[in-house]
Image (cartoon, rainbow, N blue to C red):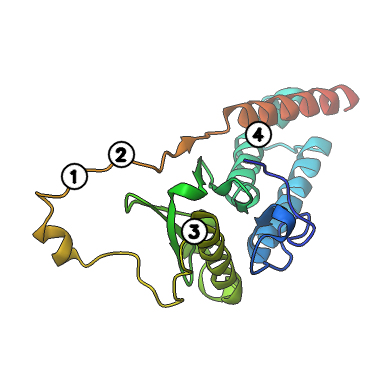
Amino acid sequence: MSGASSSGSGGLGLGRIPAVLEDDAPVTVRQHAVLGVGVFLTLVIGALAVTVLADPGESGGTDNAFTDRWVFGAIVVPAAYGIRRYLFRPRIVVDAAGVRFDNAFSSVALPWEDVADARGRGFVEVVGTDGDCARALLYGPTFAGPLTREERPAALVALIRAEAARRNGRDPLPEDYAATPLVSDLAADAEDRPVPDPVIHPRPSYGVPEAVTYLVLWTAACAVAAALA
């Protein structure tokens, strides 16, 4: 599945969400407020890092120019890693192949034949043909309410539903359709119902190379700053 953004959704995934895929161009969706918070925190952490590299003061207490700077990596490196994983990585990609959720530490990709429905108001969730669900961190509870523009998750759900119906030869689902069956109905025939093979397979992504890269860059920056001190 392609991860490229369409011109309609904007390079950062902040543009409009079309009703259907236009010329099968991929649509990438990110959340405005989340990226804004990420940029702000990056500037804060960057300013802290520059200040520490320039003059760590007496807080290090080791009388070693490199070590006094490097120990602040306990703040800078985890902060940079967390901003990248929780604020910059989450996105939703809809393209000719299907739907992909990139969350902080996992990715879920569903081809259209495995997409039964999508739903959400303050969140976006895709329902597989086996009834299992995958929710995007992008519109999860943490970023609901005033940080979520209500029309964007609704438009994204409508796009996924329309494309799933069109590509699978189904009639489009109504907006108020509830994909989750009643618990009592499930319990009544649970013993007689065959267990379907799962169609949702989350792929772990812990970002270890990113963390190592940040640590190496911080170490190199500390070494250069100590040499110039």
Residue 36 is situated, as x and y percent measured from the top left of the image, at 70, 62
Residue that numbered label 1 is attached to:
194
Q: Amino acid at mark 4?
A: Gly
Is label 3 in a helix, a strand or a loop?
loop
Label 4 residue SS: helix
Residue bearing the label numbered 3: 169
Q: Are marks 3 and 1 in contact (CB under 8 Å)?
A: no
Q: Which residue is mark 2?
A: 197
Image vertical order of residue 180 relative to residue 86, above or below: below
The residue carrying mark 4 is 73
Residue at image position (75%, 28%) is 217
Q: Nearer the viewer, mark 3 or mark 1?
A: 3
Residue 118 position in % (x across, y down)? 46, 62
Badge 1 amino acid: Pro
Q: Is residue 199 above or below residue 154?
A: above
- Asked whether disc 4 touches disc 3, contact meaning CB atoms under 8 Å apart, the reply is no
The amino acid type, in three-letter code, at marker 2 is: Asp
Q: Residues within 10 Å of mark 1 (few under 14, many from 20)?
A: few
- Cα separation between marks 3 and 1: 25 Å
Q: CA distance from mark 3 to mark 2?
A: 22 Å
Write the residue at 59% across / 39% down.
78
Q: Is residue 192 left or right of residue 210?
A: left
Whether residue 137 is visible to the viewer of this picture, yes or no, is: yes
Q: CA distance from mark 1 to mark 4?
A: 53 Å
